[in-house]
Amino acid sequence: MPGTLYVVSTPIGNLGDMTPRALEVLKSVDFVAAEDTRVAMKLLGCFGIQKPLVSYFEHNKRARGDVILARIAAGENCALTTDAGTPAISDPGAELVAQCREKGIPVVTVPGACAAVAAFSLAGLRGARFTFEGFLSVSKPSRRAHLQSLVNETRPMIFYEAPHKLRATLADFRDTFGEDRVLFIARELTKLHEESFRTTIGGAIERYEQTEPRGEYVLIVAGGSEPETPPVDAVAAARARVAEGMSPSEAARVTSRETNMPRNAIYKALLEDTEL
């Protein structure tokens, strides 16, 4: 009979946020799969726990995942942890969870701290909807393509960012969303130097021209306005292109370029046609 993979959330800074259940699970499992075994060893040591550790991170996840999977399949129980917060959220642990699901191995969550949710609860942005975007790519073309796909997003967008990339990311935000878009910044959540504030993208750029970024950041970009409804003639032109064999996506793009109407609004109207 196979063992179980426990997805164990750990504190994002304050050790007081470690849950009793997480401690129970860490004490009971046969081994711990950790993003960084040094971080995990230090955390376990704070609670007097000693367990065999297996490193599991972005660059060894495929080979190491097979080893971990074989041990669980043989009956051992494993706790999956990340350096801070909830594993498998913008984290290589998602791959191990997927592998276990594919093999029919039980996966159990042990919930706890999550920086994205913690920051959103501080932002005071009305409404329950948001979109989690995680870390942007270090590749400039990939970063720009990612952000461009969010140009018409109306929900708040949550990003993670490291201090050494913050200034470049803020510049990309300005180029994509404009400098007047509201931005909520939270850094070093639950730690000694925790800080959170509302500003604009332009205001944040000005602030960090004078201040050196420090700590881990959660950035929440306010959503944009709902795209205006395209006029009937723009939708008609797009429909004509679809009738001639063009895909709805391409028809929306071409019509948007000709009419200066939001591509997403035209595309949405075309999709509604297919639902009728």
Image: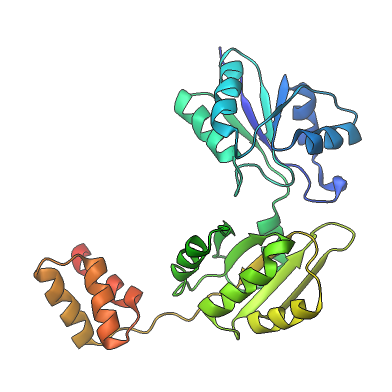
Residue at the image point whose x is 74% and y is 43% from the top: 83
Seen in the picture, residue 26 relative to 240 is either above or below; the reply is above
Residue at the image point whose x is 70% and y is 41% from the top: 82
Q: Position of residue 253 (x, y in %)?
A: 28, 74
Residue at the image point whose x is 59% and y is 49% from the top: 90
Q: Nearer the viewer, residue 195 or 167?
A: 167
Left or right of 28? Residue 132 is left
Location of the N terminus (image quadrant): top right
Residue at the image point whose x is 67% and y is 25% from the top: 78
Q: Nearer the viewer, residue 18 or 44?
A: 44
Seen in the picture, residue 65 relative to 158 is either above or below; the reply is above
Q: Please tell me in which quadrant of the rendered image residue 168 appears.
A: bottom right
Left or right of 115? Residue 96 is left
Seen in the picture, residue 106 relative to 205 is either above or below; the reply is above
Tell me how many marks there are.
Answer: 0
Q: Please tell me in which quadrant of the rendered image residue 251 appears.
A: bottom left
Viewer can see residue 93: yes
